[in-house]
Amino acid sequence: MTAAGTTRRRGVVDRRGLGVLTVSHVVDDLYQGAVPALLPFLVLERGYSYAAATGITLAATVLSSVVQPAFGVLIDRRPLPWLTPVGLLVAGVGIGLAGVGDSYWWTWAAVALSGLGVAAYHPAAARAARAAAGASAQGMSWFAVGGNAGLALGPVLVTPVLLAYGVAGTPLLAIPALVAALVLLTVHRRAGAAAAKRAAAAKRAAAAGRGRAAEDDWRSFGWLTALVVLRSVVYFGISSLLALYVIDRFGVSAATGAAVLVTFLGVGALGTLLGGWAADRYGRLVTVRAGHALCLPALALLLVAPGPAAAVASAVLLGLGLYLPFSVQTTLGQEYLPNRIGTASGVTLGLAVSAGGAVTPALGALADAQGLSWALVSLLGLPAVALLVSLRLEDPAAAR
């Protein structure tokens, strides 16, 4: 039987519910994409060092990485659909406040507040998306690609606003969150409650069909967490330094550097959809390993790129390589911990992913001391290590 047939047996996709969640994911993750797009303007307008600028990335991730798994544990015990619109609103307001004060620590705290909102949003939304997608990797990839689209739209929204108004124009960036939160507060509560009921019904049906509850595979989940951490370090390193690297090395404008970053994030959205399709057709582990294998030559190409065109080509390959495994790793985590879907989502989308943000200040310090090229060179070995770690994983669906 084909993988597609297996997917169909896992459950029917709720396209309407998945669509609502996907759109909300676009808006929420727009504010994650806004952070790396802010960095060149903070460096150029306020004179921040690379270490200080990447410290802003740390602000966006440190609180989120600690709190997001806790939100996951919480929603495993009690569905809280209101966390989705409230988290989205806080994410937008935090970015909106980032440029209001001149103090570095004001900006740092505002971006940290945005990270808290992101932490509140993801576990509840991912749990509902899991139920709506029927455990299909391709269905889950649509939810994930909403986040990727948001990440790509972040620089698209931020760059023209800050070019026109400077860093003080950040309050305008909160408008999408205000609108989306108002809509979600009226329509998403019902959709979230319905998704929670479907998830509970599916869990009861699965347990009845097996005669006993599925066991949580913490060992495999541990290996998966290590894999996602490695991907996260590479992702945050690239997204934080790519625009600055292109501007510094080739002497181009901030708008051109932002365009290369948009290319990287935009292709990432395509890579996420392609990863979901490939996982259902060829297998999830094949897709995960292919993505990590592609990252090493793509990063090498960026380092030896003779001009901006080659840098764009490397950004395309990096976007594909880093995002092919993205939604697939999320569904794997949820299947390794079938009794703790919220916890699995909180770790794979929160603690593990945000771990990369904690490393970026060290990359920024290295860039200040040795140059941006050396900061990127330090990432070269991580895709190879990730590929080796992926060999420790087994597909739980194939095992069953």
Image (tube, rainbow, N blue to C red):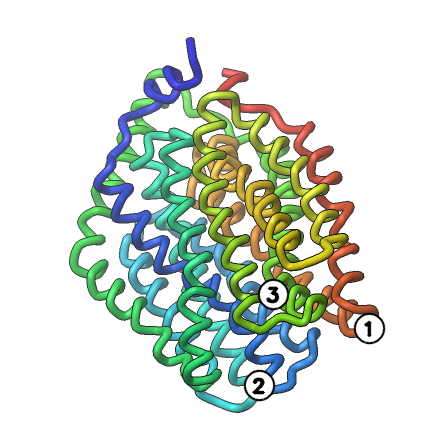
Mark 1 packing: few (<14 Cα in 10 Å), some, or many (20+)?
few
Residue pushed farthest bottom?
A: 102
Q: Quadrant of the N terminus?
A: top left
**Which one is nearer the viewer's eye here, 210 or 126?**
126
| Residue linked to disc 3 | 243
19 to the left or right of 298 = left
Residue 126 % position (x, y) = 39, 45
Residue 321 % position (x, y) = 60, 41
Mark 2 packing: few (<14 Cα in 10 Å), some, or many (20+)?
few
What number is the disc on residue 129?
none
| Residue linked to disc 2 | 45
Residue 258 % position (x, y) = 53, 66
Secondary element at image label 1: helix
Spatial distance from mark 1 to mark 2, Cα to Cα? 21 Å
Residue 245 visible in the displayed image: yes
| Residue linked to disc 1 | 369
Spatial distance from mark 3 to mark 2, Cα to Cα? 15 Å
Secondary element at image label 3: helix
